[in-house]
Amino acid sequence: MSDRLVPNLGKCSLQSPIKLSNTVGDGIANYIRDEDLVRHDVHVRAGEVTDLTQFFEKAGPREKLYFAPQHVHAAIVTCGGLCPGLNDVIRSVVRCLWYRYGVRRISGVRFGYRGLIPDYGYDIRPLNPDVVDDIHKLGGTVLGSSRGGGDRTSDIVDSLERLNVNILFTIGGDGTQKGSLAIAEEIERRNLKVAVVGIPKTIDNDLLFVDRSFGFDTAVAQASHAVTAAHTEAHSSINGIGLVKLMGRESGFIAAHTVLAVHEVNFVLVPEVDFDLEGPNGLFAHLEKRLAERNHAVIVAAEGAGQKYSAAEGTDASGNRKLGDIGIFLKDAINAHFKKKGIEVNLKYIDPSYIIRSSPASPVDSVYCDRLGSNAVHAAMAGKTRILIGMVNNEFVHIPTGVAIAQRRKVDPESSLWRDAIEATRQPISMVN
Amino acid sequence: MSDRLVPNLGKCSLQSPIKLSNTVGDGIANYIRDEDLVRHDVHVRAGEVTDLTQFFEKAGPREKLYFAPQHVHAAIVTCGGLCPGLNDVIRSVVRCLWYRYGVRRISGVRFGYRGLIPDYGYDIRPLNPDVVDDIHKLGGTVLGSSRGGGDRTSDIVDSLERLNVNILFTIGGDGTQKGSLAIAEEIERRNLKVAVVGIPKTIDNDLLFVDRSFGFDTAVAQASHAVTAAHTEAHSSINGIGLVKLMGRESGFIAAHTVLAVHEVNFVLVPEVDFDLEGPNGLFAHLEKRLAERNHAVIVAAEGAGQKYSAAEGTDASGNRKLGDIGIFLKDAINAHFKKKGIEVNLKYIDPSYIIRSSPASPVDSVYCDRLGSNAVHAAMAGKTRILIGMVNNEFVHIPTGVAIAQRRKVDPESSLWRDAIEATRQPISMVN
Amino acid sequence: MSDRLVPNLGKCSLQSPIKLSNTVGDGIANYIRDEDLVRHDVHVRAGEVTDLTQFFEKAGPREKLYFAPQHVHAAIVTCGGLCPGLNDVIRSVVRCLWYRYGVRRISGVRFGYRGLIPDYGYDIRPLNPDVVDDIHKLGGTVLGSSRGGGDRTSDIVDSLERLNVNILFTIGGDGTQKGSLAIAEEIERRNLKVAVVGIPKTIDNDLLFVDRSFGFDTAVAQASHAVTAAHTEAHSSINGIGLVKLMGRESGFIAAHTVLAVHEVNFVLVPEVDFDLEGPNGLFAHLEKRLAERNHAVIVAAEGAGQKYSAAEGTDASGNRKLGDIGIFLKDAINAHFKKKGIEVNLKYIDPSYIIRSSPASPVDSVYCDRLGSNAVHAAMAGKTRILIGMVNNEFVHIPTGVAIAQRRKVDPESSLWRDAIEATRQPISMVN
Amino acid sequence: MSDRLVPNLGKCSLQSPIKLSNTVGDGIANYIRDEDLVRHDVHVRAGEVTDLTQFFEKAGPREKLYFAPQHVHAAIVTCGGLCPGLNDVIRSVVRCLWYRYGVRRISGVRFGYRGLIPDYGYDIRPLNPDVVDDIHKLGGTVLGSSRGGGDRTSDIVDSLERLNVNILFTIGGDGTQKGSLAIAEEIERRNLKVAVVGIPKTIDNDLLFVDRSFGFDTAVAQASHAVTAAHTEAHSSINGIGLVKLMGRESGFIAAHTVLAVHEVNFVLVPEVDFDLEGPNGLFAHLEKRLAERNHAVIVAAEGAGQKYSAAEGTDASGNRKLGDIGIFLKDAINAHFKKKGIEVNLKYIDPSYIIRSSPASPVDSVYCDRLGSNAVHAAMAGKTRILIGMVNNEFVHIPTGVAIAQRRKVDPESSLWRDAIEATRQPISMVN
């Protein structure tokens, strides 16, 4: 059996309060069954044998529930850095629990996993549809967030027991979901009946098996605004260079998409593709050529790009490797290069940073968040655990947490995305000498 | 063989000027081969046999071309109503032809198929990267558009011969692509070597086999703005009712997505789902109940909804059935109902109409348009014809025009989209008595 | 003495809790004194004698108060149609009362004057800084609004007595402020000590003596969006005509400013300037000429324009004269004209209506609303009554209500505003035969 | 006579092609006469004698011109940093010259004064309405800009002679207008008949005698976006501190207005108001108190604030004093302070920098720019020189350049603006010990 399928906490024997159908063709949506699967890999090359095990379980409301709504105490926690749509997801989870299932005990954990660790003092607030009514119009998370704490597994499970929580929704990135998996395993060791359902948050869109992560479209839209500013500056100056640093620690998806959205970038640098600064095929040489021809240039660098030049040491509280600041590094290096050459350039550096990630969700992201949240609730009520909700080929699915976090998704230099991105910039396929 | 595969104009024997690789793992994108296929249906139900013929040919640059760039004269035509992203597509086609393939004869046909019909006087303008440099920042189409003319097949093919056009890009909807298919068939009858490649435009997102059509995300974002206004009005009045008519002649996708984006709609009406006004389970009864409980309500109606009440007669110049105006009809009917009942209501009706479709593309749509345009060029240069460029499961593909226009895509009342949309409104599954 | 000066309810003898200075040059803002005046008319023509009586009392915090904060019960009411910034004003009044003066009894009257009339049932809710914290991010008014009721003077004053309200803030337009004046006069007749301070709301910007009304800049920005859409449609069609109806019942300020903002309008029609449709100097003739030269045209009509053609009969609940719908009228008349002439035109009509007025305030309007609200509170605490807060030559002032509502402000056809607007359209100075 | 009045190049004896009226009441705008004056100071304190000499000449079309349009060669130059609305002003000048006066020789000088200095190679491009048609939709300046060069007076006047330019429009800030004055004086010395008319550009709004400078409203709107992001970040973290650096080298107008627009700032620091960091009344003490009470805080610092702490040395190419970076300084100082105290804070620093100034103009700014440009043309055609176009009490006027640049406008700590700004933050009147 595929490692993509997920076990339940136990047998589902309670009738769902959501009235759907089991008949195709009666004009009413059908309950989803655990046998409904979604294929991940859609590529076929003539003569190849397709791997038929690459399926994910389809998400959605089940006819039979594991939990009786009147006995559910659900808790929601948001962890790590901000991402557009956090409040939309919280709102959707609360509304689906309350209105569709009749759950009345919903708790918001304040400031990430810390809100579940006694040292910091519990920080829990009751949630209901009134409290969350307008929160999707604001950026950030009304629950607050923090980094770290996910390794305090035992303390957190103690707290869940003490608070009598039997469903935990964890909204967060890689580190958070590692914590979430550890929590679920500790729950299993203690033989508790607590479902842990994750909603993956990664503004960098670097989640394996998932078409796009929530907040990503909003991030690209905000990033486009910054890159347009850089282009305007570059275009209005003598040998103007606009340089923008965008998010993307290990994956350059925001950079690649923004380049395709803005149409005015000449060089895009991402962590997945090496480049040299010096030498006949280095960035400097190509930049000089571009300036000679067109008098201005725009460069977009993902924050994880060029770490061979700017790497720092150590890790942050979420366990992420510390990066050198490629933006400042490039700004100084480019200025120094042209100064040495005696060529006047006017470099304008933009680091939009928090402006991007604290934005409210765009309408398209709002739709996505709303559906992510509902599907997380449907999964939890059916006793699914140790899973993330994802979207694969436009279908919402259950992804086993362990499978999802095994590896990050990266921009494949051989993919059509990267091919189209560098086609849009017209930079060389490789800038390595 | 699957009817999803597409024949070429002839053998491709010219080496492409685009330098890519044929080796996986060398860090350079590979040429796409005609044997690279993309699966459309990703659903699997245990025990079912998957239909292995449901494949589409993958789009992208081929190693061998049919056309020699120096002999290409490409023409681009935009037809029908406006849609966000038209200029992005035009720009992308021009840039890809010019920069990637070195094509230097590119013509823009003014005002739809009419620009190719002698009665109206030819109206053609030369295009190059300078002309299209900033057009993506503007809504509409710089080429102009018009309805109809697609049935003047013979005249149009005469013109293509006279102008020596050997690649025709048709950007337009259902009617346009029917015309495009007829043109391609006439070309075949005459044994000409002219590729006809369509880029499907449908703001309603009602194209079969395609994940989403370009401009759709922008349309949802603009529609959301109008619905938020309706909610504000409704919320600020005594028994306020906000009523918004949105695009969607035969398919309610914009309405369904907007409802999920805005979170503040109470009733959504689409062409695919019947509803009654009167009776204990009709809209009026549910609306009364909602007002009694919450003092305000928001209704979104797709223009094709409720035609059993408001149908008109005849067809327009594109051959589309004329619709009655469901917005005005509902406005009057609701006001009359409550007047009869002696209940004060304050109904505010919003018809955002052209504000939505004339908007410039959002960044996410810009990315999509850019890639659609390039892939259309890659297809045409390889001699593909009678196809549309579409996106299936996040991959760009060639869809045979005849297959694509056989039927419109509709909101399936049993789909998870509709299930989630009415869950967001909390309206009854059915409002038929 | 000038009729521009305002009497107090009585002697101000209480020290204000706001700590300011009475010394110029100590770096601390000074208390405003009733002797501080602001000149309205700034025009001087050599040889003319300036009328020295045209002064308004300057608004701002006084050193001595009439009301003791602990005895204040303030009520806020919003009346009439929506306008961007209503919530900003409410928020500012509440915050200034609470934080600056320490007032703790603040009531929000629901749904306009009706909330103070017993027949409708009192509808009052307590307000404090927490309740209003985020309301400025939403359009509309959290208090709700309605038309009419302002003539129920005696009932309203009864209610104020019963509720023990001693400061009433009325946020509303012409009709509201007439009501507000009647209420203040009835209060005086009964010898009550209740201050009535108005904050004038008129999205049309038609208030005499006031530079611009709140929400006006936001309205122009939103209107510009609609006119840009009309231009895009017109530009993309054969003989495209974009027609937009904008607010402006008796004054064409929104239309005139929008025309200057958008730069793409060819004809602007306002209530203050007569025009003919037919004849050699009529709109139709000029429109034909424009289409012949440029193939597209954009027309902006204020809703009160051309009433000689489209006038309706009667008045609405606020006592405003009912207008015929000039937008629909022009749409039909223009289409009929060109049909008769056998000229193909493609007219696209946009009525952005509620989308404009329900928008949240722009940042510039937010600044203005914030300051209007504070100055209203400063005035009321000093016992000022029967006044509106206005801005004259960039200074906030007290305008006696009777003076302000005596007449509407109109676009003067001889003003530089109108001169510049028609210069931007390049339409003839007069389109009367 | 007032030093506010301006001499002409010579007698105006040519009839203007613009048809206006000399009769009040005929419904047609009147020609402006040099005797039409506008009062600057509108404050009156009972008993004080008003200074009747504080008048400015009113701007607008004159009946008689100095220049014959067919002999005019006008040049436009943009200098210094970007500012929203530059393209709007250029467009307006070109259109007014071309359409209203029939001038056909209009030159755009590239990259500031440098385009007029032989060493750099002349860089001039012809302008006409087609070239500038859509430029107002883009940020930046299509002419390009640069700093410096304004001191090369003799070279520049040589160039004007050689190019036969008789009207020069200079769009730029303080340094530019100093240069512009020197150029005009050199022109007078040489007894040339060249009009020099400035359009003052200062995103900081620090121009004496002018209500607001163009681009200012757009800048406040963009700055508000950044401050909202900072608030979102602060609010979502444990002891979150949002810190934003805004433009404002010597004047804190953007900061003061943004604080009033956003409603969510707790401390605003401007160049005009001193503050201490340490001590019982310093920023740190108040910040600690705020965090203890509300767990988050937002700080806005104008770039020129706190230079006693962070001053740098030297001047830039425009002759502006170099500033230390107060943003980075405060970020480090606040983090160090709380680390020392053992209090966890999460400070997020945002420097929106170029994103603000490169934005296209908002609709309200577009209106203003359009009218500034026209009035500059009217002035120049009437032979006015050595003036700037400004808006005083909502009227466009001619301000003698020497008067305007004598001093910068600053935020008066005793003004109602600053009073209202710190009332909105609720920070102490003084944070000096």
Image (tube, coloured by chain):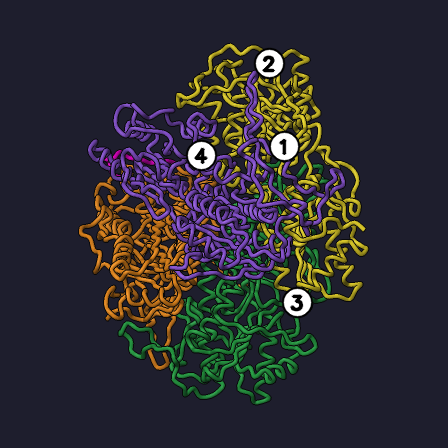
Chain colours: A orange, B green, C yellow, D purple
To which residue does mark 3 refer? B320
Q: Position of residue B78 (x, y in %)?
A: 58, 69
Name the quadrant of the N terminus of chain A: bottom left
Residue carrying label 4: D409
Give left or right: position of B382 versus B82. left
Q: Is residue C389 left or right of residue A296?
A: right
Q: B348 and A312: which one is in front?
A: A312
Q: Chain of mark 1?
A: C
Mark 1 vs 4: CB contact within 8 A? no
Question: x%, y% of residue C433?
Answer: 81, 51
Residue under numbered circle 2: C9
Badges 1 and 3, same chain: no
- Pinpoint the chain carrying mark 2: C
Up-down: is B297 above or below A416?
Answer: above
Check the residue under mark 4 and report the chain it is in. Answer: D
Horizontal side of residue A159 vs B111, given as left or right: left
As drawn, A140 above or below D338: below
Q: What whole-number distance in Å separates the C-alpha atoms at marks 2 and 4?
A: 39 Å
- The amino acid on which the numbered mark 3 sits, given as a three-letter code, is Asn
**x and y percentages locating residue A252 in the rendered image:** 32, 60
Label 1 close to label 2 by CB (< 8 Å): no
Closer to us: mark 3 or mark 2? 2
Amino acid type for the residue under numbered disc 1: His
The residue singled out by tag 1 in the image is C43
- Outermost bottom residue: B191
- Circle nearer the viewer, 1 or 3: 1
